[in-house]
Image (tube, rainbow, N blue to C red):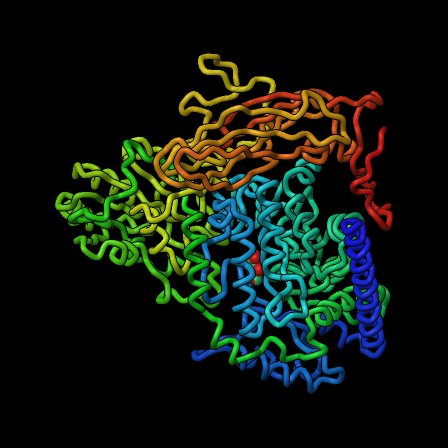
Amino acid sequence: MMARLSIVGAALILSVASAAAQATTSRAARFVDSLLARMTLEEKLGQLTQLPGRWGDTGPVVPEGGEGEIRRGQVGSFLGVFGAGYTRRMQEVALQSRHKIPLLFAHDVIHGFRTIFPVSIAEAASWDPQAVEHAARIAAIEATAAGLHWTFAPMVDIARDARWGRIVEGAGEDPYLGSIMAAARVRGFQGTDLSAPNTMLATAKHFVGYGAAEGGRDYNIADIPEVTLRDIYLPPFHAAIDAGAGSVMASFNEVAGEPVHASERLIDGLLRAEWGWNGVLVSDYTGVLELIPHGVAADSASAGALALRAGVDVDMVSRIYLNKLAPLVRSGRVAMRDVNAAVRRVLRAKYDLGLFADPFRYSDTTRERQTLLAAEHRAAARALARKAIVLLRNEGRALPLSKSLGTIAVIGSLATDARSSIGNWSAAGRAEEGVTVLEGIRRAVPSARVVHARGADSATADTSGFAEAVRVARDADVVVLVVGEHQEQSAEANNRAFLGLPGAQEGLVRAVRGAGKPVVVVLMGGRPLAISSFADSVPAIMHAWYLGTEMGNAVADVLFGDANPSGKLPVTIPRTVGQVPLYYNHRNTGRPPVANQKYTSKYIDVPWTPLYPFGHGLSYTTFAYRNLRLSAAAMRPSDTLIVSVDVTNTGDRVGDEIVQLYIRDEVGTLTRPVKELRGFRRITLQPGETQSVSFALGSKDLAFHDAALDLVVEPGFFRVYVGSSSERVEEARFELVDPRRCGKRVLRREVPRFTWPAKSRMGAVICR
Ligand code: BGC
């Protein structure tokens, strides 16, 4: 009876809550409509205009164009400026405009605001969505205190090409992990109530296919088959939108000959009509103007017309909407309906953020003083940084190091590079507030003699520091060699055609190894580095990425065993750049590689396998997987199959393991990947402890887009793999049966181009 009553009670609360949500929605719509009805065309175009903020020597200054543009209602938002006092002053100017429409302040708050967390690829390496959500929450708490309302994050681009500099900004190569991280970060930034003073609008970017730039060259074209677009590149965007992302940014690239900024098919069609999303679509920086060099617009007016028609609401920086669209609207070349729809979405975002109720809600100097770099924010950054470190190799248990070592040589210019420790896109982060690797080591072992030598840097071929590095190494008990890329080498437009250590660092590794002391390599960087030249000849390698404000402390925690490493690679590490693109979820081909069989798909000069596979990462303890079992040998599309395995900590330390589950569809109407991640779980095990870990598989986990672009599951055999990486796995098999003998089950039917119905049919199970 009690249970029954509580169910009734819960249902009542739910229906009251949804009635309240509906009332808010229609109140918001009425407010926006009545405002829109009073606006001139120029004021409308102003709302769609985002201008760059300007920084003077001591902080943000009155933006280009002066306060007049704001007062005339010609600016809807600013980019790149913040500060509670400053944004308050600018809002005061906006309130002098005819309709008193508050401004939006936007910025790239990517992996922290003032307290900097690990770069996004490193956050993904933690495989810990709760911790990643918490990091985004803290970033929003800090950023909103400084007057920001809108972040251009999360970046959810799938990247299969290590040459691409922006691989550092996403969650790596896998759509499943990428989707989980995308949703976690949206939840963190936006919280549960966008109007709260410490939550901000999140932007899923860059829509879409930006990570597939040909040759790994940023901004290059992306040639993506439609099924790959839907199975690989789109899912993280869908996950971000399901999590409530209020904004999406268009990408610079073209897909199949259509620049995304002009793609009605992708923006108004797929995002809005098919997925039913109604948030703010912002252009990328000068993305509207770039339709001219793309070659689809002859001049800026046509570029603006194309972008607005495609569904780009906000013109970032190009000023084309503001300066060029009014005559086109008046002559009918651009539909007023499209302008109104875009303005409605912008005004609605301002309403949802609570800015009409209180334009100064986010500009709170007291809160700004109290929250930035708060002690608990630093503690969270350190905890996540520890989890993000991936131990790639640890021969003879070279790590952890003893704290009673006499002399430790720390070699490499990156060991003292405070700017690189916090990584690119570090918002209001300050290098001097961060802890470098050298500082972290010194703090962790105050009794040891810690000697630093620069050795070489990552930007020049200068070898003059080698001799001193070798001398310092000879005098030490152990060498911690910090090498990799400085933060500008893993970032926008920083694409590389070689994936080895840049500068003279490979030579430095050789020279230091020659000193005959145990060498522990700490790799810094934002991309998979092809380190075959030394990977087998140093005892230990840890991938430490750029870990943020607490970088040095986290690295020392792991080096000296105060933390047990648990991160796993969210990307495949190739042996050499020639293997790229190299990713674990590839298709099999008709001639999969076989050693000693020449006419199979491989190289004659390098193995086809990666140096380290996706999902790889060691611990100071060991884990054994036993007793993989399935709840049934066969399932129907409507069933749930339970996959279980027993994981035991067989070592002598407490440790976290990330248990990974992959599937393979053995036979499909289209070729299927050799493995696809479909679940993971982070568990903590005491020495000797065993835990049974279970995963539920349903038809949506087995689905893919077929040749008709329907999302389908096809009857037949599937393999299930569970293990500690994409390579180290236990294996089982089950059959998907369809008693109705349909060829396949359609989970979601894609809608033909240009005839989008109001709603997608996602979730429906239709037998064809
Ligand atoms: C980047 C975006 C970023 C924007 C604004 C562009 O260059 O591609 O990711 O959000 O600048 O800073």
Relative to 717, does residue 524 appear above or below in the rendering?
A: below
Closer to us: 351 or 58: 351
* Quadrant of the rendering where the C terminus is positioned: top right
Going 72% across and 77% down the picture, which residue do you hit? 356
Is 272 displayed left or right of 511 in the figure?
A: right
Q: Image quadrant of ligand 1?
A: bottom right
Closer to us: 330 or 24: 24
Q: Quadrant of residue 152?
A: bottom right
Is 514 displayed left or right of 490 in the figure?
A: left
Q: Quadrant of residue 281?
A: bottom right
Q: Quadrant of residue 51?
A: bottom right
- Residue located farthest toward the bottom when viewing the structure as drawn: 96
Q: Decide if residue 578 is in sight here.
A: no
Is 241 displayed left or right of 141 in the figure?
A: right
Location of residue 641 in the rendering, given as x and y in whole percent from the top left corner: 68, 29
Relative to 551, does residue 731 appear above or below in the rendering?
A: above
- Residue located farthest toward the front when viewing the structure as drawn: 1
Q: How many marks?
A: 0
Q: Decide if residue 728 is in sight here.
A: yes
Location of residue 440 in the rendering, given as x and y in whole percent from the top left corner: 30, 56
Relative to 421, does residue 319 appear above or below in the rendering?
A: below
- Residue located farthest toward the top when viewing the structure as drawn: 597
Going 22% across and 44% down the picture, which residue do you hit? 479
Location of residue 623 in the rendering, given as x and y in whole percent from the top left corner: 43, 32
Relative to 486, does residue 591 appear above or below in the rendering?
A: above
Location of residue 449 in the rendering, given as x and y in whole percent from the top left corner: 16, 53
Going 51% across and 19% down the picture, which residue do you hit? 593
